[in-house]
Image (cartoon, helix red, strand yellow):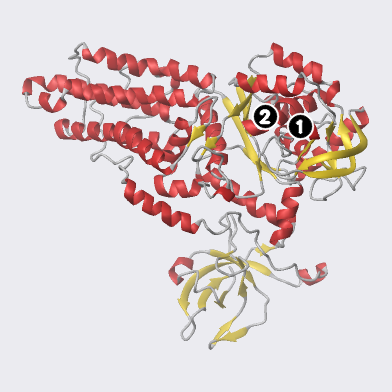
Amino acid sequence: MRKKYYITTAIAYASAKPHIGNTYEAILSDSIARFKRFEGYDVYLQTGTDEHGQKIEEKAKNAGVTPKEYVDGVAGEIKRIWDLVGTGYDRFIRTTDEDHVLEVQKIFRYLYEKGDIYKGYYEGMYCVPCESFFTSSQLVDGKCPDCGRDVQPAKEEAYFFKMSKYAPRLIEHINTHPDFIKPVSRKNEMMNNFLLPGLQDLCVSRTSFSWGIPVDFDPKHVVYVWLDALVNYITGIGYDCGGESTDQFKALWPADLHVIGKDIIRFHTIYWPIFLMALDLPLPKTIFGHPWLLQDGGKMSKSKGNVMYADDLCELFGVDAVRYYVLNEMPFDNDGTITWELLIERLNADLANTLGNLVNRTVAMSNKYFGGAVKRTGVVEPVDAELKAVATGAKDRVVAAMNEFHIADALSEIFNIFRRSNKYIDETAPWVLSKDPEKADRLSEVLYNLIESISIGASLLSPFLPSTAERIQKQIGAKPREIDTLDRFGLYPNDGNCVASQPEILFARLDPKTVMEQVEALMKKDETPAEPEAPKLPPIKNEIAYGDFEKLDLRLAKVIACEEVKRSKKLLKLTVSLGTEERTVVSGIKNWYKPEDLIGKTVVLVANLKPVTLCGVESHGMILCASDPSDTELAFLSPEKDLPAGWVVR
């Protein structure tokens, strides 16, 4: 039975489109999850969105939409970007999901009835962006100690959690579990600045706004956003504080790793473990507070005009290039830096030159000298040993780095294989060997060694740059290797296996001037508000009785012919089969579909609609379609399975 590995990202706050610094966490977590799968673990990766709080309520109001409409738009954008960069999550949880909402209410009630939550009165300073309360002594120059923004006085009735009750137990846990908080600098910060000076009780409800999960026994209160958000790590896998947790929860909890940004380390290493202690649940094994990705020496901020977005970067450089840069340039403990100039320089040096050029040269020489069929001949020389040692020794070094979450070091070890392979080409000079027929066997051995080294490197690279690794293996005619085989040299088939007939350019060398012109165009595009607008959907029509709906006869219909309606810019004439008869239907979908694209499709037809004549053609029925509010996009409705024409839709 394979060992489980449960890994989570922090759930992204659904207030605005995430920049590349936010997206880095999704890429980082995905790479760790992929590597653990590569090692043979049964991995479950959870990510998602945090969708409640005063800040979102205010943004929705300013946008003229409901909070739910607002977060639907932003959460969709976050999910799109996570998907774009290749995040292979198992669940994308939203804190507006019904199962999460119901369990948060149950947890709040349970902790209240247990005596860990009590009603009181709060007066202090509140930071809206951070959703956090502070005393005057905790402020830095009168501003929020976390984000540096202005705070405002807050005075309201609230429920409080007895943090001090569990503080000694948490201190003991941290001291006896050295892997609980990483890096150690984060642990020292939490101990010295918060735990050892003494914890104050935590406000866990609000009454000054309404966009949150209501406290079910006191509905004027909504659950404090951090209690709501943090418990997603257990609600998302089926926790039930009433004792009916799912088998999935029992198999996955405790989490093996929470990946979070260093700015929310306090919530995850103090509040979250204490909540778990109160629920009598084991604590997560490790909480990794990664550093920030800075732009021009500071945090990315829309107000500063220095925001870089993942979709823009992927459009310019490709997904794997973006993944490589952020993983390679982010140190374990200190902040990383991203600029357009550094991006171009790094991608040219590492991806275009070191990796891309190596694969291109090796495939090209294999085709030129042996028609793509390279075999091991046994003609070895001392220079081969160092290449083989670097290639076969990389696995253990990569595993060691990944166990400590030193992702950049792991990538460096992999690229050492590629660097050593390039040096090996210079040392063996295949172009010289090719001129001497008696050196043909030696030349074949050299090319075999290169292909085998590239195959090992590509296999190790697959968790970080999955698409690139797959393309490399395809070019050299190799299959992805299991991790336990990567310390052995010579497993590439010795049967004249053929490489690709033509080398494919993995990463084209970037021209700085051209790229910066493209960047300027992107910057102009991004001068528009980065926050996605929630869809302004038309209001729901007046209620109808169930009997009114029953009057409709909706049937599946198969399109058997289609043509344009003359004298019309919008209409198509469709002939559809209802199984027992054929009908002519006129539909205004010409702007979205070509006639030939519709033939053979199954659509949903209002079959008992009174016939009408449109542009001289009698239409007997109506095809159902869905469209966005502006009618710029439209799609007909179709069943997920291939079902017979005439079936009733109900």
- Residue where numbered disc 2 is placed: 265
Q: Residues within 10 Å of mark 2 (few under 14, many from 20)?
A: many
Q: Is residue 3 left or right of 573 when viewed as pictured?
A: right
Q: Is residue 432 left or right of 289 when viewed as pictured?
A: left
CB under 8 Å between discs 2 and 1:
no
**Rendered view: 603 above or below 265:** below
Most extreme residue toward the bottom is: 616
Q: Secondary structure at mark 1?
A: helix
Q: Which quadrant of the rendered structure holds the N terminus?
A: top right
Q: Position of residue 418 (x, y in %)?
A: 32, 26
For image coordinates 29% across by 22% down, the residue present is 420
Question: What is the three-letter code of the residue carrying label 1?
Answer: Gln
Question: What is the three-letter code of the residue carrying label 2?
Answer: Ile
Q: Which quadrant of the rendered structure holds the C terminus?
A: bottom right
Q: Secondary structure at mark 2?
A: helix
Q: Position of residue 593 (x, y in %)?
A: 48, 69
Q: Earlier in the sequence, mark 2 or mark 1?
A: 1
**Rendered view: 402 above or below 614:** above
Q: What is the number of the mark on residue 138? A: 1
Q: Position of residue 456 (x, y in %)?
A: 36, 24
Q: Nearer the viewer, residue 271 or 473?
A: 271
Q: What is the number of the mark on residue 264? A: none
